[in-house]
Image: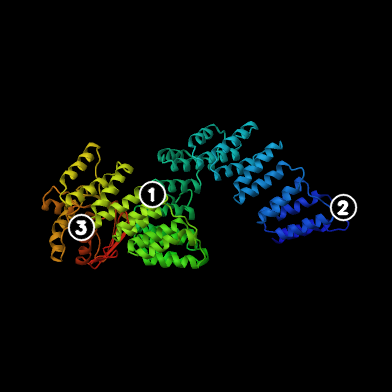
Amino acid sequence: MSSQNQTLRTLLQPLMQDPPHLSSYAYAPIFQLLTGHNFSKLGQQIHAHMALRGIEPNSFVGAKMVAMYASSGDLDSAIVLFDRIINPSSLLFNSIIRAYTRYGFAEKTIGSYIRMHRLGLRADNFTFPFVLKSCVHLSSRWMGKCVHGQSLRIGLEFDLYVGTSMIDMYVKCGDISDAHKLFDIMPARDVSSWNALIAGYMKDGEVNVAVDLFERMPNRNIVSWTAMISGYTQNGLAEQALDLFDEMLQEGSEVKPNWVTVMSVLPACAHSAALERGRSIHNFASRIGLNSNSSVQTALVAMYAKCGSLVDAHHCFERIHHNEKSLIAWNTMITAYASHGCGMESVLTFEDMIRAGIQPDGITFLGLLSGCSHSGLVDVGLKYFHCMSVVYSVEPRVEHYACVVDLLGRAGRLVEAMELIDQMPMQAGPSIWGALLAACRNHRNLEFAEMAAKKLFVLEPDNSGNYVLLSNMYAEVGMWEEVNNLRAILKSQGMKKSPGGSWIEVNGKAHLFLGGDTSHPQAKEIYMLLEALPEKIKAAGYIPDTSFVLHDVSEEEKEYNLTTHSEKLAIAFGLLNTSPGVVLRVTKNLRICVDCHTATKFISKIYGREIIVRDVNRFHHFKDGSCSCRDYW
């Protein structure tokens, strides 16, 4: 800054002479020099000096002053100055358009552009990119098309900067087809236009098109690689995301991951419960100095929580400096505790967040209410639900009502849950009726179950699980005609029960098992262990729960069906392939059944293992014959 200060003094010296002999143009280089350095007060002093000498800024100098004020965070002064200039120029409009865009005032940006157009002032390649960015902010594809038409009329459609902004606008406004058409006819393309298209196709789920573009790119930068990794992750292709990240780490790779890349790949670890891969990426992030990056630490909190290591998640959360803990960071930790059934910890973290002065949002309350539901904190959950809008100005959405129905239903307060549904200000959706149906199954309330199931048959006609659940409830009370009717519907509509699948990571590799699966190379050893297992755990007090198995097969067949559930296959594989004392981490695509839950408690005691099962709803930590959920799930 010393050389800039010297230049500033040199420029100011002749301007401070009395009387001055200079025009307003002489001030332009000073305001140019002040731009971007937070010198708003100095700029105001020089502006006042001009006024004392009767020098009014023209549109050229005004444009420099508007840019100076805006870059210093003084948008109000920029606006006042802009409004005072009688004959504005395109340069002046560009300055105020850029200022409005910078501060997120998209509507004012568009308004200024329209006013500029009405005055007959010509937009240029500095105008259009900011206006297009505001079109994206407003999700206004129609306005974006109008701007496209204007750029076409004045011959700027193929300007590299304008064309790339146009492609980005079409992509983000959901018109990938027009974006690709423009891309194809552009005579010159920079890497940003390729990146925008790749991100757009990934967002639309057209992964193969994105891969083809990536492979054809003449030059790739860090954004290109990150867009691919992020896209793979968003489309559930965790292994591809991790493989591409590993490719970036290889010696000779054209680019290396940065903090955005790390944040993009961590959810892939969470998706596949690849804890060891996650730890490896964490170590990499530490080596390149990202330990102090709050966004990376927040992503690590989410990854560790979803991979079953709540201790590591909490450690990463605590590493974030108190002043840098954003709403996202607090929400992530609250939700992490909730998913592991630690409802009171969710509540305490929420209270810490409020004391820290952070305003909660809808996601905060989803995590909080879910934590209360999974932990049986009914009255606590109801208290927070009832004060959401009054105290915290967060209006409950259908997801929040679903959490409260689940909260009441798990506790057996089904009448209250039904009353809440009746009083909802919006239509109850599948999540509401699904929560009620599950609660009715647990508490054996057939009347409410029928009501909930009939709603779900309309809302989710292809979800076979609702039919199976009600069918089993009918079978339990001997209503075989109703059982047969439901099975006939399932058969006539070609619906099949969703296959249960579980996977476990051993030595950095994920192994997937389906119910009754015999395709694994170690299937013989797995089934030998499982054949001997029932006798071992029965001796410890285990009684098979066959209430969820089809009712028209023998008791022996029912018990065999339970033995071959996917989570038991995964646990058996883990016992065979890990050393004593190693924690087994299993992920299941459906809700863990009652029998597997009971059996896993006994397995944890007999084999002296900690077993963590993540099902579609939550985590279960099994140790010494008990589960963290205390059988409340």
Q: Amino acid at mark 1?
A: Asp
SS state under label 3: helix
Query: 66 and 531: which one is in front?
Result: 66
Task: Point out the image quarter for the C terminus.
Answer: bottom left
How many neighbours does mark 2 have within 10 angstroms: few (below 14), some (14-19), or many (20 or more)? few
Cα–Cα gap, marks 2 and 1: 68 Å
Residue 126 in view (yes/no): no
Q: Give percent across and percent down for residue 477.
A: 17, 52
Residue 548 in view (yes/no): yes
Q: Amino acid at mark 2?
A: His
- Provide the residue designation for mark 2: 21
Cα–Cα gap, marks 2 and 3: 93 Å
Q: Amino acid at mark 3?
A: Asp
- Provide the residue designation for mark 3: 595
- Provide the residue designation for mark 1: 243
Q: Is 469 on the left or on the right of 133, as rendered?
A: left
SS state under label 1: helix
Q: How many marks?
A: 3
Identify whether 312 is placed above or below 132.
below
First in sequence: mark 2 or mark 3? 2
